[in-house]
Each structure stands twice: as structure tokens, then as C-alpha cells.
Amino acid sequence: MSPTHEAGWAHVEGALRGPGWLRPPADANPLVASLWSSTTHKVDGNLVVGGVSLPDLVANVNTPAYVLDEADLRARARAFRDAFAGYDVYYAGKAFLCTTVARWIAEEGLSLDVCSDGELTVALRAGFDPARIGYHGNTKTEVELMRAVAEGVGRIVVDSFDEIARLERVTASLGRPARVMVRVTAGVEAHTHEYIATAHEDQKFGFSITAGDALEAVRRVVAVPGLELLGLHSHIGSQIFDTSGFEVAARRVLALHAQVGEEVGVTMPELDLGGGFGIAYTTQDDPSDPAQLAIEITKIVEHECRALGIGQPRLSIEPGRAIVGPAMCTVYTVGTVKRVELDGGAARTYVSVDGGMSDNIRTALYDADYSCTIASRNSEAPPTLARVVGKHCEAGDIVVKDEFLPGDVRPGDLLAVPATGAYCRSMASNYNHALRPPVVAVRDGVATTLIRRETVDDLLATDLGAHE
């Protein structure tokens, strides 16, 4: 988390210089290419994505808007598919899902992971083969499980003893079997924010290996005639840059895999190592590419299987952020620019935009870092350290904590934030009765709206008092 001081942010050492990793640029106009989708560049100061100039796009769809680079998303999906050949690669739909993206994922040969009935509905509406869908979630109701089994979902990741009992009733009622994986917690502290580190013991997901719950869950699944045990599932967290956590998790999960074979007499055919692969939000981030990840993870599993003297199960992974995150940016219009003067000559420049925590909650929720650029013109003004904030009635409504922008940034400028594909639209809200932005796909100079902007009628549709 960011450092604090009881007298306020300005009293924190270095607060007005920005974080140590953020270097003042000589020119605030150029892009840092590693933060943007592959087709993104500037032409005379105008940001162009997928062959579409953002000022031209904004003239048609207004701001704020999410801009999705189709070619980039597809290329990242293929990169994981090809690098992890021989694996099952499940796109984690929770990162961002709509019917069109589900179709793209299917066309690129990936499977799909969903974690709610709503996500399952979108996938099925897109024509996604249910046999290639995995269903996650730590609290699935009997109604949700009934639908998943009836639709023929390829695998259900069980997360509690209650859920195993529910599935037993569901499969008996429908007379249809269900293929399941058992979610386990490997006791690994991933190097990420505590809210997105999901394999340590003190959290809501999975069965503890250490406490023996995971082995007991396997025994219960095996005892149910309507359940087919595929294997174990482990997920150590999100926004992870090295494979050391995967190494420890694989060692512990494969040890349990071997124990199941010895004590339960069942050889499980599969093993899922989850996702959580990091992306570059700012220049401090240095993610591995899929090919390197595949080499390192495969070596880890092969080594552990040899050490245990067991055959290697079929492996699966679940990238979400790493596919859609860099493929999307968000474009805003600057509304106000305010220089806040403090005692001793300290000051901060606040750049307020027409969106905020309703379209990107991650900065407020996770203390996440983002970058940004002026997307509608060049500037000869020297760079100035700025904080980009939203329009909501919260002091914590921050979009970009620190970034160097041209010193003449002004109302009416378009400002674009890269790497907003993962979780921003998925976690968007109507806070302050804001209307959620559209998602516009761009490719080869053509812009196509995938999700339209919400309207006031949408906002009032569930407010029954409006019909009195």
C-alpha cells in the first residue's frame, strides 16, 4: 500500500516526487510501447488503436469508453495456446467477458472458465461448446449447479464439502454425471496484493492441503457415483511475475496427487495450475511472455513428477488478465485541472476526468498503479507530475496515482489509460448513478461497439418507483 502520514499525503517523504520507479521523461508525448496493445501508436499526437484514431472514435461514442484491440487480444490468446501446446488453456472470463469475446476465444482454440450463472449464460449465448467450459466459484447454489450439469459443462471446480453434497443431489436428480476438480490451497504466499493472493491458508477458496481437508474432499468425491474426479486445481493469486510460487504450489499439489493414488487408489488424469500471470501496467512491471512461462512451468512439473515417481497428468492453466488486460485502454475527457498549493511551497496537480472508480475500481481497491497519456494532441510543454482522479464523491477516487503529463494539460484534452482490459469493465458500477461506458472493438480501421453505453432508461429500469 502507499505510505501515509497522520498530517496528510504531502508530508510523506518523496510524496511530491512520485514513486522511485517513475522517472521524469524529457518529453511527455511518446508512448511506452510495452504498456499498450500492439497496434497502438500516435499520429500527430492523436492516439491510434487498431487503425482508429481515438479523437475520431470519441466523436461518435463520447467518453469515457473502453477501447478493445481485437487483433491484440487474439494474438495474445494464440500465444498462450501455442506456447502451452499439450495443455488445456482456459481463458478466465471473469477478467472480461461478452458474447463477442467468447466467440473470439473459441475461434482461437481456447477453453473458457466461468464463475457465475451470468458468465455461463453469456458463454452459451455465444455458442461456446459447454464441454470446453469450466465452472468456478466458492459458493455455487443448487440451482446454478443444476443448470451447469444439465448444460453439460465440461468440469466443475468444487470448493467446499457443502458443494460436493449439492452436486451429489443434483447428479442423482438429473441422472447425469458431473466431471469435477477439487480446488486446493497450497499454502503459498504469492507476491501480490493480499486480496488477490489466493493460495495462502487464511482465505475463502479451496480445501487446505495442510489441514487434510483436500484429501478428505477427494475421498468424498470418489464416493459419489455421479461424480467423475478429474484432478486437483490450484491457483496462487494474480498479477504474478515469477514462477517461484508455482514451483512451491506444484510441489505440494503433486505430492497430494501422488498421495491420492497411493491411499485412495485413484490416478487422477488432470492437474490445473490456475493463472494469475502478470502484465505491465507501468514501467516497474516486467512480465514474462507465454513461451518463457510455458518452459519454466513445464520444467517444474516434470521435475516434481520424476521426484515423486508418478506419471505427469494433463495440465491446464487459466490466463485472463494476461490475454485481455493489455488489449484494452480507457479514454476519458479532462474536465478540470487543479494545482493544489500547500504550506512550504508543496503542490500537486490534479487532473479530473469524466469517469473514475465506477469504471476502474482497481486503484481504490488494490492500490493499483496505472499510466496514461494525452491522446488528442502533441504538446511542447515540459512534463509535470500529475494525479488523475475521477468525478465521484470519494477522496479515494483515483485513476492514476502518479504520471508525468504535459504541463499544459487542460480541460477538453482526451486522456487514455492503458492496460484496462482486465476487471475494469467486469467490476464497473453505477456508483453515484454513473452510466457504465461502452466497450468498442477496433480492428483494421473499423470500430464496432460490443457493449453499448448504458442509458438513463437502463438506470431506471430496475427502479420500480419510476413506473408509479
Image (cartoon, rainbow, N blue to C red):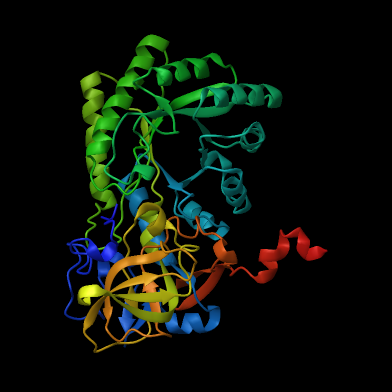
* x and y, in percent, of residue 4 in the image: 27, 56
Which of 71 and 182 lies nearest the eye of the viewer? 182
Residue 380 in view: yes
**x 70%, y 65%: residue:** 460
The number of callouts visible is 0
Q: Residue furthest right?
A: 468
**x 23%, y 80%: residue:** 383
Q: Which image quadrant is residue 152 in?
A: top right
Q: Eyeballing the image, is 213 above or below 406?
A: above
Q: Which image quadrant is residue 353 in?
A: bottom left
**x 25%, y 48%: residue:** 241
* x and y, in percent, of residue 9 in the image: 28, 63
Q: Which image quadrant is residue 189 in?
A: top left
Which of 250 and 405 lies nearest the eye of the viewer? 405
* x and y, in percent, of residue 42 in the image: 32, 81
* x and y, in percent, of residue 347 in the image: 26, 75
Which of 340 and 441 lies nearest the eye of the viewer? 340
Is 215 on the left-hand or right-hand side of 42?
right
Is 438 on the left-hand or right-hand side of 47?
right
Q: Eyeballing the image, is 105 above or below 269?
A: below
Q: Eyeballing the image, is 229 above or below 299?
A: above
Is 306 on the left-hand or right-hand side of 97?
left
Residue 311 in view: no
Quarter of the rendering occupied by the C terminus: bottom right
